[in-house]
Image (spheres, rainbow, N blue to C red):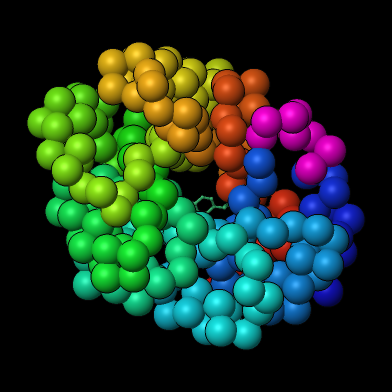
Amino acid sequence: MVDVAKNLHDVLDNLPDGVRLVAISKFHPNEYIEAAYKAGQRVFGESHEQELQKKVETLPKDIEWHFIGHLQTNKVKYIAPYISMIEAVDSMKLMKEINKQASKHDRVIKILLELHIAEEETKYGLTLDACRQLLADGEWRDLKNVHICGLMMMASNVDEQEQIRHEMMTAANFFDEVKAKYFADDDEFKERSWGMSHDYKIAVQCRSTLVRVGTAIFGPRVY
Ligand SMILES: *Cc1c(COP(=O)(O)O)cnc(C)c1O
């Protein structure tokens, strides 16, 4: 078994005040999560609803779970009772479904809007213009059981640090734009979720507040 506690502390040592770690435990067994939990970690991220459900049932109740993957609308109802934050929301349709399911449990679910800035082709995430449009439309203001707490993005999976830095700074500047325009009075709109195992050190230089680190803590995933 990898030394989860040591790896966890190595990552935490690199995080300045104000940056929180989401330990990405997808595809890793409960023992690994328990090792990180014993070392003090409480925020974990998963990307598959069924796997998350199994873990939630068997692991300590004070874990704060973040859903970090692409979430299908028909899966929202399963995680709505307990999920702390849904990080990758990229459509009004999904936001409305989260609102509907959260209201059934009398909860307000925190979400992040997922941006697509990386060069790579992906179906997921909002372009900056699509995100501007979604916020301008204003329909989100009616959703009382959803709270938009910030932005999330994944930088291109490349070796060029300057490209990664450029993409993350684009996201950071865009955060300032929408913060000023829509969320100036909302102290909860504060999260900038970028940075994974290979680029979280760059992310903290690009004003990340949440880094999502898996491999550097738990080792390679066995799919
Ligand atoms: C898997 C995943 C991560 C963690 O990636 P590592 O390279 O293992 O640190 C972070 N963010 C998202 C959205 C992921 O799917």
Residue in the picture at 46% in, 69% down:
82
**Picture mark count:** 0
Q: Nearer the viewer, residue 144 or 149?
A: 144
Q: Nearer the viewer, residue 185 or 159?
A: 185
In magenta segment, residue 17: yes
Residue in the picture at 20% in, 38% down:
141
Quarter location, residue 10 = top right
Residue in the picture at 41% in, 49% down:
110
| 10 in relation to 116, above or below | below
Horizontal side of 76 relative to 13 (left or right) equals: left
Which residues make up the magenta segment? 12-19
Quarter of the image with the N terminus in it:
bottom right
> Picture coordinates of residue 163 (x, y %)?
49, 22
List the single residue furthest toward the front.
106
> Picture coordinates of residue 30 (x, y %)?
68, 79
Query: Is residue 132 among what the camera can see?
Result: yes
Query: Is residue 120 among what the camera can see?
Result: no
Residue in the picture at 43% in, 80% down:
50
Horizontal side of 137 relative to 90 (left or right) equals: left
Quarter location, residue 165 = top right
